[in-house]
Structure formats: structure tokens, C-alpha cells
């Protein structure tokens, strides 16, 4: 394989270093071989994945995720960027929700893999992780927390039913509307415009002094929140 695919680890995840010069189909074959060889090492671990060395389309990312899933027992819970500090803060937020326990993902939460587009509504009675973007015109409603491993550009309602101890996290936060419990978020400036890429620093929306505030996601902030 001539080192076309190199796997390295970081806390809670792995980095896939890809050769930028070879054909993608050949690269995909090498990924299949690499993860088949490493299957006994990873077993059924749950990890985040970062991909470096090559610019990929969403379709190519999807093919890589499918190749890993079909040729190993490894569970990829999210794709993360090269910003190590932001990634770790995001993973800490995931672990403090009610769908993780000491052994991994519990039955108290839900994962949705895909992008929510204009007109789509996703509603759940548990906390939820969205592995994709929430586009303008789309809506996500949860009685628990909402974590979006992508951009929030549509509407999000967490703590539906009046629970103000919930929160919303997104890798890029630019919602049309956002509500937590009985409190609505009121933006203090203009929201970012299309296009939705590139992703920026993760942010968290939560209730403070009876209003919804939005702050960068940091370790210090997470330790202060009643979650």
C-alpha cells in the first residue's frame, strides 16, 4: 500500500492520513485492507474520526465511513476537524449528555445520520446527536439536548416541554430560530450568510439568568454548566 493510508490515534479518536496523489478508488481499496487488518485491534470501540492529507467531497467521506463500517467493528460516532482543542471540547460535550454512560452509548439518546433539508422536521423524546447539517427551513425538536456535528442554520428546540436545563451545541451555530425550554434565543447581531462551509469554532447555547446565551464551547464553560 506504500503508506497510502496511515492510522494514528488521539484521545477518543483516530486520524486517517491519506495520500493526496493516488486515485480515490485505489485509496478506498487500501482503506478497506487497512481496517480489515486492524479489526482485532479496534474491536467494537466507539471513536471520533479525523481525515487529513486530502480534500474530500461529502460523497467521498461517506464512502470512507461505509468502508470502515463494513470492514471492521469500529463505530465512528463523528467526523472532526484538525482543530484538536475544539474537537476535545466537542467530545466532552457529547460525554456529558444522557446518551453516554461508562460503557459507551446508552439507550437514553438517539443518533441521526444525515442532513436535514428545507421542510424536514426531526422530533424526538430523547437527547439527539445529528451527524450532519441542519439547513435553513429544517427543524429539530428534542425534549433533551441537541448536539449537531455540523452546522445549525435552521430551527432547533431543546428541552421541549419546558425543561430549561438542556442545551444546544453545534460545530457552526447560525440558527434561524433557537429555543430552550420556554426561552427563545434573540441574536444580538446579523447571522452568518451562506455558504455553510467552512466550519468554525463549536458553540453552545444554554439558559443563563432566564435568557438563552450562546458561547464558544470550552472546558471551563462545560464544568460550570448544570448538565
Image: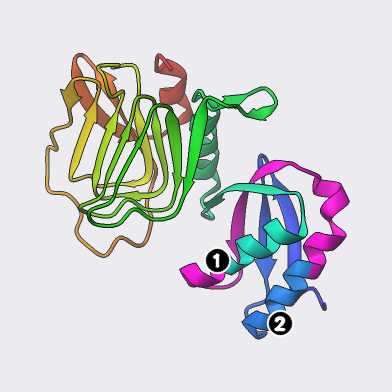
User: For mark 2, what is the residue?
Assistant: 26
**What element does badge 1 sit on?**
helix
Q: Which quadrant would residue 157 be assigned to in this image? A: top left
Q: Which residue is mark 1?
A: 61
Q: Residue at x 77, y 55 (%)?
A: 72
| SS at badge 2 | helix
At which x and y percent is residue 138? 25, 50
Instruction: Write the start and end of the magenta stretch as one range.
Output: 33-60
Q: Is residue 206 left or right of 61 when viewed as pictured?
A: left
Q: CA distance from mark 1 to mark 2?
A: 15 Å
Q: Is residue 191 left or right of residue 161?
A: left
**Badge number at residue 27:** none
51 part of magenta stretch: yes
Judge by depth and name the residue closer to the eye, 215 or 108: 108
Q: Are marks 1 and 2 in contact (CB under 8 Å)?
A: no
- Label 2 crowding class (10 Å Cα cut-off): few <14, some 14-19, many 20+? few
Specify the quadrant of the image occupied by residue 62.
bottom right
Residue at 50% x, 30% y is 109
Amino acid at each position: 500500500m506504500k503508506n497510502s493510508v496511515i492510522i494514528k490515534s488521539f484521545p477518543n479518536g483516530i486520524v486517517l492520513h491519506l495520500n493526496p496523489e493516488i486515485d480515490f478508488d485505489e485509496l478506498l481499496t487500501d482503506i478497506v485492507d487497512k481496517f480489515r487488518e486492524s479489526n482485532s485491534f479496534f474491536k467494537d470501540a466507539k471513536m471520533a474520526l479525523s481525515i487529513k492529507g486530502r480534500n474530500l467531497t461529502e460523497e467521498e467521506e461517506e464512502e470512507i465511513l461505509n468502508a470502515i463500517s463494513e470492514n471492521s467493528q469500529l463505530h465512528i460516532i463523528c467526523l472532526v476537524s484538525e482543530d484538536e482543542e475544539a474537537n476535545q471540547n466537542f467530545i466532552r460535550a457529547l460525554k456529558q449528555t444522557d446518551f453516554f454512560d461508562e460503557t459507551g452509548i446508552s439507550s437514553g439518546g438517539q443518533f441521526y445520520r444525515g442532513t436535514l433539508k428545507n421542510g424536514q422536521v426531526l422530533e424526538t423524546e430523547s437527547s439527539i446527536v445529528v451527524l450532519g447539517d441542519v439547513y435553513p427551513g429544517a427543524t429539530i425538536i428534542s425534549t433533551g439536548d441537541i448536539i449537531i456535528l455540523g452546522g445549525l442554520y435552521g430551527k432547533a428546540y431543546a428541552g421541549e416541554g419546558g425543561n430549561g436545563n438542556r442545551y444546544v451545541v453545534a460545530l457552526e451555530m447560525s440558527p434561524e430560530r433557537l429555543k430552550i425550554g420556554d426561552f427563545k434565543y434573540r441574536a444580538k447581531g446579523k447571522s452568518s450568510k451562506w455558504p455553510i462551509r467552512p466550519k468554525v469554532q463549536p458553540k453552545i447555547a444554554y439558559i443563563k439568568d432566564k435568557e438563552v446565551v450562546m458561547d464558544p464551547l470550552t472546558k471551563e464553560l462545560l464544568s460550570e454548566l448544570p448538565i
